[in-house]
Image: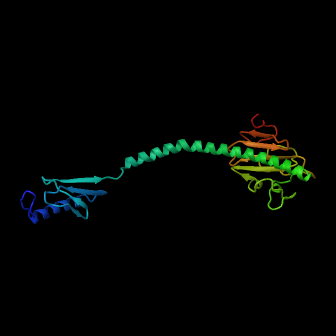
């Protein structure tokens, strides 16, 4: 082979050069990835082997370039940053969720009060004995009023339990164990809205007066202050 300046170069020299490149590749097997650059002499061409392109400088020096993976310390730093962000964001997220659930509970109590007034004025039989009567599908009737949604009629919605009691005697806080009072026509009722779990929000109470009362620490009762009062 003849170089650009007219000098010739033997195949033995080329073979030796590439053997040196192969040795460099073998010595770098512990790296994640290695690329070797060998400068091209005048009149020679790049050679692409199984390890990438090879070039050799005019003085015979072989240049090595490696790409390293993340170190353990770098990964630990990333994990620590993620944990710090989570520690800041999660409490705020929980507070936002509790506030949303409380707002939904108040809205549900207002829906129940409105539905009870509509029911009593439509059928002239007093209020209902159970929440399920206010639900229903198909043609509305005295036992199938279709005034509230099917989720609320089950007594559980958006992180709150709703306990409806007809003719309470006497009215008071309800953790879920109060039964309907004895009456032929329901002239009064109460609804307690308790968070689930009980440590996750405010407690609410309402009755036929339509006033919603709140207690921040225990089951709400008729003696608690009205919401916003």
Q: Residue furthest right?
A: 184
Q: Quarter holding the N terminus?
A: bottom left
Residue ranking furthest to the left:
7
Residue occupying image coordinates x 73% and y 55%: 151
Q: Is residue 75 above or below residue 144?
A: above
Q: Residue 124: give x, y in percent of width and height.
A: 92, 51
Q: Quadrant of the C terminus?
A: top right
Estimate the x, y position of residue 72 in percent, counting from the top left: 37, 49
Q: Which residue: 63% across, 45% down?
A: 97
In the image, 197 versus 103, the foreground residue is 103
- Residue 147 appears at what percent x and percent y? 80, 53
Residue 228 visible somewhere in the drawing: yes
Residue visible at 52% across and 45% down in the picture: 86
Task: Please tell me which residue lies in front, 115 or 74.
Answer: 115
Q: Is residue 39 left or right of residue 98?
A: left
Q: Residue 125 at x, y = what percent?
A: 92, 52
Colour scheme used in the picture? Answer: rainbow
- Left or right position of 85 against 65: right
The image shows a total of numbered marks equal to 0
Residue drawn at 59 percent across, 44 percent down: 93
Please indicate whether residue 165 sits to the left or right of residue 94 in the image: right
Q: Is residue 74 left or right of residue 214?
A: left
Residue 219 visible within the image = no
């Amino acid at each position: 082979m003849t170089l650009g300046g007219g000098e010739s170069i033997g195949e033995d020299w080329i073979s030796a050069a590439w053997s040196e490149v192969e040795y460099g590749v073998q010595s770098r097997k512990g790296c994640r990835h290695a690329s070797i650059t060998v400068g091209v002499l005048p009149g020679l061409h790049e050679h692409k082997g199984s390890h990438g392109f090879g070039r050799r400088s005019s003085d015979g020096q072989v240049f090595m370039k490696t790409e390293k993976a993340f170190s353990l310390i770098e990964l630990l730093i990333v994990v620590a940053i993620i944990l710090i962000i989570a520690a800041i964001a999660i409490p705020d997220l929980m507070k936002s969720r509790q506030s949303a659930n409380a707002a939904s509970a108040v809205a549900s109590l207002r829906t129940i009060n409105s539905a009870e007034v509509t029911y009593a004025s439509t059928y002239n039989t007093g209020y209902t004995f159970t929440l399920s009567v206010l639900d229903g599908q198909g043609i509305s009737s005295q036992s199938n009023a279709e005034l509230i949604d099917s989720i609320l009629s089950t007594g559980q919605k958006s992180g709150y339990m709703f306990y409806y009691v007809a003719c309470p005697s006497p009215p008071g806080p309800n953790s879920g164990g109060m039964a309907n009072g004895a009456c032929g026509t329901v002239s009064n009722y109460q609804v307690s809205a308790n968070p689930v779990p009980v440590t996750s929000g405010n407690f609410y109470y309402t009755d036929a007066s339509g006033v919603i009362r709140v207690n921040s620490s225990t089951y709400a009762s008729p003696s608690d202050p009205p919401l916003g009062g």
